[in-house]
Each structure stands twice: as structure tokens, then as C-alpha cells.
Image (cartoon, rainbow, N blue to C red):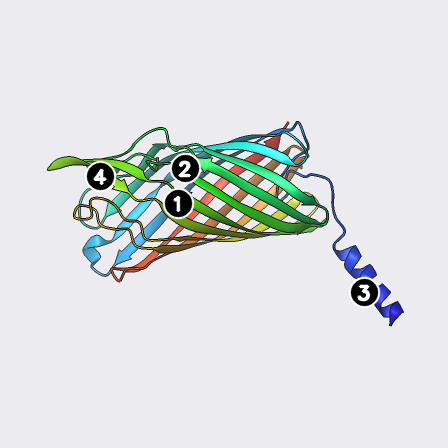
């Protein structure tokens, strides 16, 4: 029995042997102290909503440019800033096209602290979405901000070996009260949304195809609660949602400091209202991760 136990221990320890070096393709990316890094991507996609009444069917399509810049202050702690530009056009079954979201987003600040850095990795992650500009809807056309601040905190854990990585994470999001200024041909007004909470879950699997070529599989979920506001006769409450996203990404490590990415997602939006029959979407993108 002792020999069998020793053999099992040897096999398991070989299978989970840690790759302690920091690589640009890491799922739980955290570079060495003093490293500056960035992620840049360009993507396009479409969302399609089919309602119980076909007059309310809607398609939204367009593109997004995303940019992240960060810095590792220590081997265990990093800070980064994320921002994007969106140009999304809504095309309803009845009525004219409009800008569903157009412009620069609110910036997101994220901090990552690594508590365990062995074969098993465990990170604490937190941050905020900081709102500087009012959310505005002008005759249907909307900008690309949320009208209020948000805070999030969560954790990620996973493992890394030479050829395989996996990660799972969960985050609690608290959205503070938000305001939206609405202008219509029949009058203007301001809608104040109540504070609310959401839960985000992330999972990913990363494996080496050959040498510098990798695949990253992901499955994410976002659960939001009902959101009330002070103008229910004008807008109405937003029903709770459970949104799911499934992704596949090809990666090529051009060098130790450059990772090229090509991928896409399929999205399912479940809204707890009987007025929507089907609500799905997809996107495709190309991007690069770099460090210096």
C-alpha cells in the first residue's frame, strides 16, 4: 500500500507541477514587478431580439475598440485602467435607426493581488467603474456611459502547468444610483435608477496546441436583479436578467512580450419577461497583449 500511495503521489505531483514563470499568455495574467503592459482589441458584432409582438423586434450591430493599460507594482500586485469606444446602431422593426451606444466609455480601474502563487494560484480582484459624464439619450441616440459609479470585488483561482491552465472566478458588483437625461420631441426629463447588485462568474480553459500556438475556451455568466427608477410611468422597471457568454480564442505568442489574439463569443440574454421570445448575439475580434 505504501508503494501504491507513493506512486500516486508521484503521478499527481508531476501532473500539477507549477510553471512559476510569468507568461504573457497566462489566464491569470500578472507580470513581474516593474512591468508595464497593455491589451488592445478591435471587434464587431450583432445582437438580435425577437419579441412576442414582432413590431418590437430589434437588431443592434456595430464595432468596439478596447484599450487596457497597466503596471505591476510588485510581483503580487498590479493596477490597470480600461476604456473602450463603441459605435452601435439599433435597427428596430418599426421606426428609424438610432445610436444604441456611441462614444467613449466610463473608465474601469482594476487591482489584482496574488495571495498564492504555486501550482495553485489564488487572486483577489477589485475595482470600480468611474462615471464622469452624464448618460444621455437624445431622441433615441445614446452615449456610451452608464450614468453612475460601480464597484466590484471578487476572486479568481486556478492552476498553471506547462501546457494547460484553468481558471474560475466570481465577482459581486454594486451599481450606485445612476441618472439618464432623456430628450424627446414631446419633452425632456431625467430618470434616476435605484442602486442594484449583480453577480458575475467567469471560467476559462487554456491549452497549448503546438509550440507558440494556444486555444482559450471561456464561459461567463452575469446575473442582474430588477432595477427600479423614479419615473416608472415613463420608463418602467428593468426586469432581472441572466446573460451567458461562450468564447473561443486562438492565440499566437509572437515573442515573450507580444501575444496576438483572434476570437469570438456567442451570447444568450435571458430576461424575465414574457414579452421576449429570443435574445442572442455574437461578436468577433482581433487583438494583441504586450508588455515592456
- Estimate how packed mark 2 is, as few (under 14), some (14 to 19) or many (20 or more) residues with alpha carbons within 10 Å: some
Tell me, yes or no, if residue 26 can be seen here. Answer: yes
Circle nearer the viewer, 4 or 2? 4
Mark 1 → mark 3, Cα distance in angstroms: 48 Å
Q: Position of residue 206 (x, y in %)?
A: 62, 50
Whichever of callouts 2 and 1 sits on the residue coming sooner in the sequence is: 1
**Side of 216 relative to 140 (left or right):** right
Q: Secondary structure at mark 2?
A: strand
Q: Which mark is residue 45?
A: 1
- Estimate how packed mark 1 is, as few (under 14), some (14 to 19) or many (20 or more) residues with alpha carbons within 10 Å: some
Residue 176 against residue 202 in the figure, above or below:
above
Circle nearer the viewer, 3 or 2? 3
Whichever of callouts 1 and 3 sits on the residue coming sooner in the sequence is: 3
Mark 3 → mark 2, Cα distance in angstroms: 49 Å
Q: Which residue is mark 4?
A: 140
Q: Which residue is mark 3?
A: 8
- Estimate how packed mark 4 is, as few (under 14), some (14 to 19) or many (20 or more) residues with alpha carbons within 10 Å: some
Q: Which residue is mark 2?
A: 64
Q: Secondary structure at mark 4?
A: loop
Q: Secondary structure at mark 3?
A: helix
Closer-to-camera residue (292/242): 242
Q: Quadrant of the C terminus?
A: top right
**Side of 55 relative to 142 (left or right):** left
Whichever of callouts 3 and 2 sits on the residue coming sooner in the sequence is: 3
Circle nearer the viewer, 3 or 4? 3
Amino acid at each position: 500500500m505504501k508503494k501504491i500511495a507513493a506512486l500516486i503521489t508521484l503521478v499527481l505531483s508531476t501532473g500539477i507541477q507549477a510553471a512559476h514563470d510569468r507568461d504573457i499568455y497566462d489566464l491569470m495574467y500578472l507580470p513581474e514587478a516593474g512591468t508595464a503592459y497593455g491589451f488592445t482589441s478591435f471587434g464587431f458584432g450583432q445582437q438580435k431580439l425577437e419579441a412576442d409582438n414582432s413590431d418590437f423586434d430589434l437588431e443592434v450591430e456595430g464595432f468596439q475598440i478596447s484599450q487596457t493599460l497597466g503596471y505591476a507594482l510588485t510581483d503580487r500586485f498590479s493596477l490597470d485602467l480600461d476604456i473602450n469606444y463603441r459605435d452601435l446602431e439599433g435597427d428596430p422593426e418599426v421606426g428609424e435607426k438610432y445610436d444604441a451606444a456611441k462614444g467613449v466609455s466610463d473608465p474601469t480601474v482594476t487591482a489584482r493581488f496574488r495571495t498564492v502563487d504555486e501550482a495553485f494560484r489564488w487572486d483577489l480582484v477589485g475595482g470600480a467603474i468611474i462615471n464622469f459624464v452624464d448618460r444621455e439619450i437624445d431622441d433615441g441616440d445614446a452615449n456610451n456611459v452608464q450614468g453612475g459609479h460601480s464597484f466590484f470585488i471578487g476572486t479568481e483561482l486556478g492552476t498553471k502547468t506547462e501546457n494547460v491552465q484553468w481558471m474560475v472566478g466570481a465577482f459581486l458588483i454594486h451599481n450606485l444610483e445612476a441618472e439618464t437625461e432623456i430628450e424627446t420631441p414631446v419633452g425632456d426629463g431625467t430618470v434616476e435608477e435605484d442602486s442594484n447588485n449583480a453577480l458575475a462568474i467567469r471560467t476559462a480553459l487554456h491549452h497549448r496546441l503546438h509550440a507558440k500556438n494556444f486555444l482559450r475556451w471561456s464561459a461567463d455568466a452575469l446575473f442582474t436583479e430588477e432595477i427600479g427608477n423614479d419615473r416608472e410611468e415613463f420608463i418602467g422597471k428593468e426586469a432581472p436578467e441572466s446573460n451567458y457568454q461562450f468564447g473561443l480564442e486562438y492565440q499566437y505568442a509572437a515573442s515573450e512580450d507580444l501575444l496576438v489574439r483572434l476570437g469570438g463569443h456567442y451570447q444568450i440574454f435571458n430576461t424575465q419577461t414574457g414579452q421576449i421570445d429570443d435574445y442572442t448575439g455574437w461578436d468577433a475580434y482581433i487583438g494583441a497583449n504586450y508588455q515592456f
